[in-house]
Image: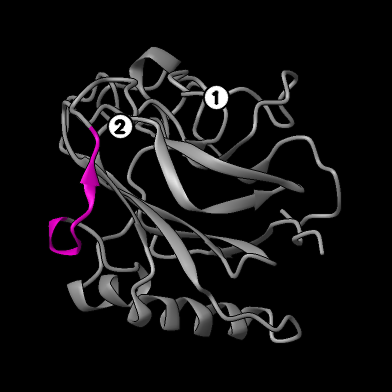
Amino acid sequence: MKPSVAFLLLMLGAVMNVQPAQEKASLLYPYGPEQHDQKNPKLDDGSSKKVSLAVPFTFYGKEYRTLYVNNNGVISFDTRVNQYTPDPFPLADGRTFVAPYWADVDNVRGGDVFYRETTDPTLLARITKDINQYFPKIPYTATWAFVATWDHVAYYGSTTNKGNTFQAVLTTNTKTSFIILNYWDIQWTTGAASDGDAETGLGGTPAHVRGVEGKAEGKGTS
């Protein structure tokens, strides 16, 4: 049986606000060195190495076995994405990626980008519970997940200590795939090279957010 196409689960957290640590832990899935995450190099417009997945992830009807976690707020499947000013969706060139917050991130100025592949039963149980809450009519038990987190990342040209914290989670049971987007603290939208204000991080061509982007071979939600 052909695996189902990806569904999108969007979870919106605190925006333009700083919340207590316990609330942060309740929204974002655990991440960081304590979770044995990998961390992207400190490189403007950089990305992770090519990540080989232990379990293929089905996205718009196609199975992918590798991906990149790009500093500029994108998880891509075919190639790295170092573009810092986002294009309007849908993309004319048909690139395939997940864009939790496509903008000009500069982790040299501040913040970190973490990622890991996991089959931890405690985390999978929490993911399963969240998906069952929002999609009660779709039988689902997570057996695998990939968690990418942008932790208090700065924007290019910043003259402040503003940072954004957000997360993208890919999960599957090999038959059905979901994408979960979590937003904790969003303090800026635009880097200076995208005509944003260096002090406020606003204006210009702001960040684009889209859970799924690609050439569909079946139905999906966004």
Secondary structure state at the residue bearing disc 2: loop
Task: Measuring from the top left, give residue 52's x and y in whole percent.
Answer: 42, 41
Say above or below: 161 vs 83: below
Q: Nearer the viewer, residue 216 or 159?
A: 216
Residue range corresponding to the magenta coloring: 33-40
The dot on residue 195 is none
Q: Which residue is mark 2?
A: 200
Q: Give the residue type that dot 2 points to.
A: Thr
Q: Which residue is mark 1?
A: 86
Secondary structure state at the residue bearing disc 1: loop
Residue under the image location 61 percent in, 84 percent down: 132
Task: Measuring from the top left, give residue 31's x and y in whole percent.
Answer: 25, 61
Tally of marks: 2
Q: Give the residue type that dot 1 points to.
A: Pro
Which quadrant would the N terminus be assigned to in this image?
Answer: bottom right
Q: CA distance from mark 1 to mark 2?
A: 19 Å
